[in-house]
Image: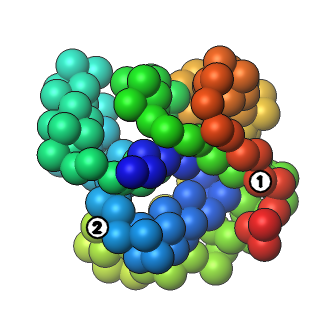
Amino acid sequence: MRRILIFGNSGSGKSTLAKKITASHGLAHLDLDTLAWQPKVPPQRKSLETSKVDILAFVRANSGWVIEGCYADLLELALPFSSEIVFLNLSVEDCIKNARSRAWEPHKYQSKQAQDDNLDMLLHWISQYSVRDDEFSQAAHNKIYAQFAGKKSMLLRNQE
C-alpha cells in the first residue's frame, strides 16, 4: 500500500496533489495544517509531542495514506512509515500565482473573505522560502529529500 509524504512551500500545490492522489488510489489524507495549530488567536503551534501522537494515530489507523504539509519537523515523524515522498519544489513566483488563485479552504478559514484577508501575509511568507532557516524552509525540505532512501520525486511545476 502506498504511504506518501508531499511537501513544499505554501502555494506549491500540496493539497491539490494530495486530493488527486487520494481520490484516484483510495488513500486516507492528512493535511498537517489540521493538527499543527492550537485553536487560538493569534495562532500558536501545538507541541511537537501532541502532533506526534496525532500523526502516529493516523499512520496506525490507515494502511495507505497521503500526508501533506510544509512542517519539516512533523514530516520527519511520518518519514519512517513512508513508502515514497514528493517534493513540490516550485519557484516562488509559481507558488505566489497559485496562492492568489487558491480556492477557499474551509478547514483553515471561516470564510473566503477571512482567507483573502490573510493573503498579503501569505504572499510575504511564500517569498521568504529560500531565505528562512526554520522547519518551513526550502533548506529543511531539501534535507528531508536528501535523507530519504526510498522512492522520491521532485516536481518543479504543477503540470508534472
Q: Position of residue 151 (x, y in %)?
A: 64, 38
Residue at point 35%, 63% (across, down): 27
Residue at point 83%, 54% (across, down): 156
Q: Position of residue 153 (x, y in %)?
A: 72, 46
Neighbours of disc 2 within 10 Å: few (<14), some (14-19), many (20+): few
Q: Position of residue 101 (x, y in %)?
A: 64, 79
Q: Quadrant of the C terminus?
A: bottom right
The answer to whether residue 103 of the structure is visible from this angle is yes
Marker disc for residue 155 = 1
SS at mark 2? loop
Marker disc for residue 24 = none
Whole-Å distance between the Cαs marked 1 and 2? 26 Å
Where, by quadrant of the figure, is residue 134 drawn? Answer: top right
The answer to whether residue 125 of the structure is visible from this angle is no
- What residue would you read off at disc 2? 107
Residue at point 76%, 46% (across, down): 154
Q: Callout 2, which amino acid?
A: His
Q: Callout 1, which amino acid?
A: Leu
Q: Is residue 78 left or right of residue 131?
A: left
SS at mark 1? strand
Q: Earlier in the sequence, mark 1 or mark 2?
A: 2
Residue at point 30%, 32% (across, down): 45
Where, by quadrant of the figure, is residue 13 drawn? Answer: bottom right
Q: Position of residue 73 (x, y in %)?
A: 44, 23
Which one is in front, 32 or 28?
28
